[in-house]
Amino acid sequence: MSPPPVDQGTRVEVGVVAAVVIGCGLLLARPALRSGPAPVLVLASLYLALLVAGVALRPHVGRFLPGREAGPVLGLGIAAFVFGRAVAGGRPTPWVVDAVALDVMAAIAEEAFFRRFVYDALLVAGESTAVTGSALLFALVHVPVYGWWVVPLDLAAGLVLSWQRWATGSWGVPAATHAAANVLMRL
């Protein structure tokens, strides 16, 4: 069954823009949420809400489960992040079960939002706009967490993840890659 056609009316566009702004705003607020009461619960709730919104909101073009082409695309994506982790070096963060679980949850929620919802919303302007636009927004929402120095790195990561979405038609492949990348940060 194919997804319903994307309604390009003004009402839908305003709603899509509002959802993108709200989702990005919530992601930008993460540093404040981390310093508040019960940060793990608050962040887990944020990621769950983002996941639900990313999957439930229209437009709905992308699918979660990929086709046969996913193996090489997933392998290349994970290899890119393994290479990046090896080149970046640095001191690993403490291995904490709730941090790893939160990192994986964040990865899946961000991919539902950026590679399912935002990517699909930008498809009306073309595939290259969907790839670059979702990657750019992905990079920018990480600035409050890591600083401006991370924009080129997160833009590259966003482009790999968006390329995976384009190559497979699935947001599940970038979600798996992003989850693996977040776990690699903890090693």
Image: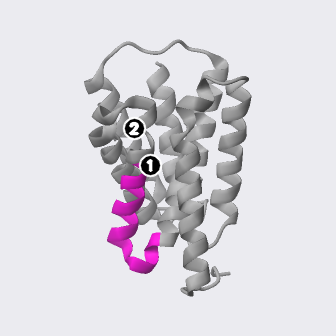
Secondary structure under tag 2 reads helix
Secondary structure under tag 1 reads helix
Residue 16 rendering spot, x and y as whole percentages: 57, 70
In this rendering, would 144 be left or right of 4?
left
In the rendered structure, does residue 19 fall within the stretch colored magenta? no
In the rendered image, the vertical position of residue 33 relative to residue 70, given as above or below:
above
Q: Specify the segment rendered in magenta.
A: 122-138
Splitting the image into 4 quarters, where does residue 32 fall?
top right
Which of 145 and 167 lies nearest the eye of the viewer? 145
Disc marking residue 74: 1
Residue at 52 percent across and 12 percent down: it is 94
Task: Determine if residue 66 is in view.
Answer: no
Within 10 angstroms of label 1, few (less than 14), some, or many (20 or more) residues? many
Mark before the other along the chain sequence, 1 or 2: 1
Residue 76 rendering spot, x and y as whole percentages: 36, 46
Amino acid type at image mark 2: Val
Residue at 43 percent across and 39 percent down: it is 142
Residue that mark 2 sits on: 143
In the rendered image, the vertical position of residue 5 relative to residue 152, given as above or below:
below
Amino acid type at image mark 1: Leu
**How far is disc 1 from disc 2 in space, using C-alphas?**
26 Å
